[in-house]
Image: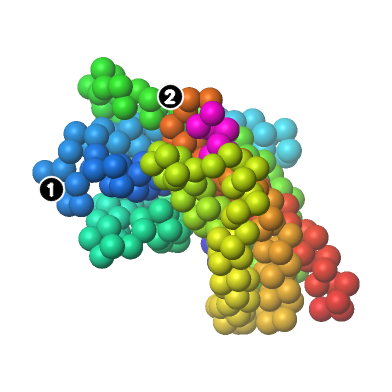
Amino acid sequence: MAFFTPMFSQSPWILALFPPILTVRGGIGGIFSGNLATMMHLGMVKPRIRGNTEPYKELIKSVLVITVMDTLILGAFSFIVNVINGSAQLDQWFLFISVPTVACTFAVCVSIPITSLIAIETFKRGLDPDILVYPILASINDIVVTTFFVGIVFLILRNMSFILVLGVLFFAIVSVSGYLAVKSRDDSNFRQTIREGTFVVVLSSVFGSINGVLLSNLGPSIAAMPGLMTMYPALTNALGNVGSIIGSKTTTDIAMGYAKSFNEEVRESSRRIVQVEVPSAFMHVAFGVIAYILSRGQGASLIPLIVVALSSNLMSFSIITVFALWSAHIAFDRGLNPDNVVIPAITSVSDTTATLTITPAIMVARLLGL
């Protein structure tokens, strides 16, 4: 994405669409991995790919349908918001509708088998899928969805006639999604996942579109600090991973009857929280170093990138931790399936929180004279 930085001023729709695509990717991946981990704990899904249970197959179908439904809503909402903000033009409506749907659907088709294999191997080795599956999935998915997004953007910028191919892919995906929805409409798990997951990921779309506006407005700051665009997905991804570990553990505890009240969870989770935050802080230092290595040819500076990464982490960690615990208990108390709600909600809030902390983090670096 950093290679597109010089084009952001001429094609701001690229920067406007990137955060919501990452956010929705995280929400949909969270629904799949969260349900998969809990189903494995409860014996509803077997630790194998072939010949698996009906709930596993219905989960896959629901995730594919949710992907199409929510990217359509994301594209429409993001288009309206960015037209108002001046980051999009009226004749770009089809780009906002089709690019997220095609990029995210391709990414989900790649990530579902990868996620399943990770969960199966984790479970077979006696490890906890709630701790490992979503963070690994989220990191892989960021690369996968960015690859498809960048590929589509590159082809559009190189030859506008590619929009015809994009249109064919878009209508084919929508048609297949409609067929799956009609075929599975009588399955109760499918309907519940669609009903609850769609609402939360639509909420993700709203937050993601806001992130797109915020990031497009940060264009001058991104240009002034080489390496920041390279580091941005890592900041949002890591914060979402921190929240997902805490949230996914809590949803499984609730499903198995181990969870306590929200207030008790907050009081007694300090050790788990510290165990997650300490490596997270070190990882953010590593993000700054890696972003510097990847972007030093563009004039990146090491210390400012480390300061921005670490400052963003310290400002956002407590917010996402409390939200992860709170959302799990609220979902359960209202009779919802926490696995359909918690990780998508965490992903939305974490992406927005991380984006909002970039500006004060840059200010901290400047106050330190960097």
Is residue 25 among what the camera can see?
no
The range drawn in magenta is: 327-333
Mark 2 crowd level (few <14, some 14–19, many ≥20, 10 Å Cα): some
Q: Nearer the viewer, residue 25 or 10?
A: 25
Residue type at numbered disc 1: Arg
Say which mark, if any, is on residue 30: none
Residue under the point 69% across and 51% down: 319
Indicate whether 314 appears above or below 115. Answer: below
SS majority, magenta: helix
From the viewer's perspective, is 252 left or right of 169?
right
Say which mark, if any, is on residue 195: 2
Mark 1 crowd level (few <14, some 14–19, many ≥20, 10 Å Cα): few
Residue type at numbered disc 2: Arg
From the viewer's perspective, is 285 left or right of 347?
right
Residue under the point 43% across and 58% down: 131
Res. 105 image quadrant: top left
Indicate whether 142 appears above or below 88. Answer: below
Say which mark, if any, is on residue 50: 1
Counting the numbered discs, the total is: 2
Q: Position of residue 64 (x, y in %)?
A: 33, 36
Q: Position of residue 127 (x, y in %)?
A: 33, 62
The quadrant of the picture occupied by the C terminus is: bottom right
Q: Position of residue 122 (x, y in %)?
A: 29, 61
Of the two numbered discs 1 and 2 on the same chain, state the one appearing first in sequence.
1
User: Which structural element holds mark 2?
Assistant: helix
Residue under the point 65% across and 51% down: 267
